[in-house]
Image (spheres, rainbow, N blue to C red):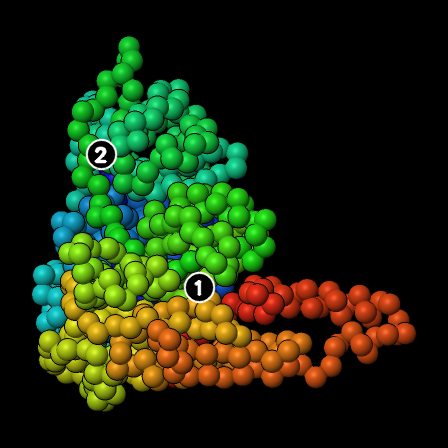
Amino acid sequence: TESNLIRNFSIIAHIDHGKSTLADRLLELTNTIARRDMQAQILDDMELERERGITIKAHAVTLKYPAQDGQVYTLNLIDTPGHVDFTYEVSRSLAACEGAILVVDSTQGVEAQTLANTYLALENDLEVFPVLNKTDLPSSEPERVLEEINTVIGLVDTAHAVNVSAKTGENCLEVLEKIVQCIPPPKGDPKAPLQALVFDCHYDQYRGVVCLVRIVNGTLKAGETMHFMATGSDHRVDEVGVFSPKMTKVDELTVGEVGYVTGSIKTLADVKVGDTLTHALSNTTRPSTEMLKGFKELQPVVFAGIFPTNSEDYEGLRDAMDKLRLNDSSFKYEPETSQALGFGFRCGFLGLLHMEIVQERLEREFDLDLITTAPSVRYHVFLTDDTEVDVDNPAKLPPLPRIARIEEPIIEATILTRPDFVGGLLKLCEDRRGLQQRLEYVGKDRVMLVYELPLNEVVLDFYDKLKSISKGYASFDYHMKGYRESDLVKMDILVNGDPVDALSILVHRSKSQAMGHGLTVRMKEVIPQQMFDVAIQAAIGAKIIARTNVKARRKDVLAKCYGGDISRKKKLLAKQKEGKKRMKSIGSVDIPQDAFLAILKVE
Ligand code: GTP
């Protein structure tokens, strides 16, 4: 396709404002998918995405649109997720586009991720135009919301705004027309040495690594040898193609086009998302010497251990993590050994939801049974000998006498809400040791709060609390601000007198008493009764600050079966085995997954 007939765009929005629904309509209107094959949110093809109704991975699809000017345009749509944990997916999608559609729910208004994603788009020099969605609802107020976009964001061109209902399809054709008119075609030289941005990839059992690429300069064909500039690996191109929306082979990919390339790549380390793809030197091709500007690589902020409940699954877990990481470059891991849990991995995530998703994907896609330990942030620990160590695992904190001081990560959080909920939200932020930076009205019924908060107060249940206090009418976004000294103490949890390394946490001294009490109470609720009493204690150093007791089970369940029929006994045993899922024996005590995450549920 000639590049002036190509438009590469992304849809950005706050969660639930209707990106995926709008994408469905655009696919339908361009006959990319026949009506009868249409399922809701066709791009959300991951099982987990359908169940949770959220977009986790970015997707790419090619549409053919016959515009009013009589020309047929190729529109490459790259769908993006909206949750704060998945911003990295947004930024890499944007790197492959010239423009973005900003979808805003006209019954709600500008939310925290509306702002965050728009800033990302503007930083990437994209052309952005607003689409006000859900106009079929009686509470829709597109004028008010447009005004809000003007006041809060300012830099977005609201003159080209389109009002639509993605649900009924009303006015969605106008969106296609605006894409052609407002978003510039890609620039680039098809004769220049090949430069393609690898913006995503995944592993396919038959084809090996499938890379999603955006061609910036040059042309790529099957049979040529491609060279990944950052990893230095060379591979013969098996196939190039586009997503329409199924993978469809094409003869070549050229300037401005978005598609996939395969090369029977089995070594995962050969490919890195964000890398530049060029040709290897040959009789007909010459490599580019210049790498494209990749996108910001994000550093994980939340860390936790992941262990197989069955230690024989360790190698399988490593293999699964290698494959998952290919598809999720923000997921980091390294081997770790825990006294209590054995061999596993210390993992880094972009947030709690990300952590939850990773555990679920590993379990489902690779059929593993795993235990995740309590999430921690990364602390800067300054020692008395003037050296510094980074600690993201409380069990690895150096002995107290060696510590001079500890600094904790601080974030700047932006919250958008309605005036009625400001009081409750201020209290929440203060309870979480927050420092207020700003409080201002940004529209008739909209208030923006900006707070500095310690990240360790946010990773636990801040987001859930925010949602419940505001009845869902508050949105939240944050970025790292820096580090600040803090009075933190290490709290150990003892099970029948033995400290369990995987349960240690760092807490602010002012909160340690309440946390110790809450944790032991919560653990008592989730640890099943055993054959004997189980004492659970919280301790700071040698001092026990809280204690609970799980009473012994009264009768052995199997006792009832003596003399009874054998099939019932078998069933009971099978049931007990089932109940052992996500359960780990520590000493002689069976501890379930919930106990390791008890800290997330402490009142
Ligand atoms: P994520 O993929 O989770 O980031 O959300 P999203 O922005 O893609 O939102 P999605 O398309 O999943 O829509 C969220 C909800 O709003 C769904 O229940 C849709 O059915 C509904 N919805 C989307 N567009 C409209 C609309 O125009 N009118 C009405 N009434 N509902 C809509």
Q: Is residue 275 visible?
A: yes
Q: Residue at x 53, y 79 (%)?
A: 535
Q: Residue at x 16, y 67 (%)?
A: 484
| Vertical placement of residue 95 versus 484, above or below | above
Point 46% across, 31% down: residue: 266
User: Which quadrant, please, contains the C terminus?
Assistant: bottom left
Identified by mark 1, the residue type is: Ala
Q: Could you say whether the residue bearing mark 1 is in a helix, strand or loop?
A: helix
Q: Position of residue 468 (x, y in %)?
A: 35, 82
Observer-side mark, 1 or 2, equals: 1
Find residue 423 and report its image quarter: bottom left
Q: Which residue is mark 1?
A: 502
Residue 161 visible (yes or no) = no
Residue 408 in the image: above or below residue 272:
below
Q: Amino acid at mark 2?
A: Val
Q: Which residue is mark 2?
A: 216
The crowding category of the residue bearing disc 1, from other C-alpha atoms within 10 Å (few below 14, some 14 to 19, many at least 20), is: many
How many marks overall?
2
Q: Quadrant of the N terminus?
A: top left
